[in-house]
Amino acid sequence: MTSAAAEHYERLLAENYTWMLGGDLAPIVAGQGELLTELGIAPTRTSAISVDLGCGPGNQSLALAELGFTRVFAVDTSRLLLSELAEHAAELPAIEPVHEDIRKVLPGLTSPGGVAAVVCMGDTLTHLPSKDDVTALLGDIAQALEPGGRLVVTYRDLTETLHGIDRFIPVRSTDNRVLTCFLEYPDDDTVLVYDLLHVHDGTAWTQHVGSYAKLRIAPTWLADRCAEVGLVPERNEPGPAGLWVLAARKA
């Protein structure tokens, strides 16, 4: 995640993140568990270690623990989201929160060939500063995975340029909170995301605004980069909640 994105999460999105997802983590965790099971994510005979890159409040980490992984490294740059995860995982000792940049964490966190599964879900990948960072991260993932180990990535395909009012995207609204995104396209590789959050404190509405850049990653480009580092794509198609799903196995 870029420093701008990390700052944006700390200042605006982190405290509203679970609300953005619907407010109740349990059905989200259940849905992620179903998806991961469908994609064949499970401990193996030789490894019960998994890594959740960009874990947030625990959508995937909690699911991985419930799938039987005995060590789940949950990595995020947001201390607030990691604190929320720790509360949810109080009865799950398998989950180990890690406050770190996902670009730097794998070589020091895991042994080469010792990890059964790595997940990077919920649009985390698009928060990286450049496509070179994506390629480097995939290389670290390939190094960490055991032969036959699995990678799952979910992300938004932002390669289509929206125009006019289509650039305004409603995220969620309740009686006291409304979140809308607005998109700009400075170049072919990035989209600038403006988050407009309106909060009612019981007396009046206040507006909170911030922005950060996301990468525009094409599914074919990501599949090719995986193949280059020995991660063979087995699924590369649209998935739940408007996210693209890529699942790959280490050759």
Image: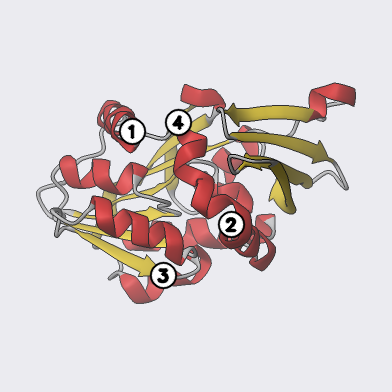
Where is mark 1, residue-wise? Answer: 32
Please tell me the numbered disc located at residue 176.
Answer: none
Q: Position of residue 133 (x, y in %)?
A: 62, 61
Query: Upstream in the sequence, badge 3 or badge 2?
Result: 2
Mark 4 vs mark 3, foreground winner is 4
Q: Work out how far the residue at label 1 is from the one at label 4, CA to CA, in angstroms.
A: 14 Å
For the residue marked with disc 3, what is the amino acid? His
Q: Secondary structure at mark 2?
A: helix
Q: Work out how far the residue at label 2 is from the one at label 1, CA to CA, in angstroms.
A: 22 Å
State which quadrant residue 110 falls in: bottom left
Q: Work out how far the residue at label 1 is from the one at label 3, CA to CA, in angstroms.
A: 22 Å
Q: Is residue 62 above or below residue 34?
A: below
Residue shown at the point (27%, 27%) measured from the top left: 34
Where is mark 2, residue-wise? Answer: 9
Where is mark 4, residue-wise? Answer: 22
Number of marks: 4
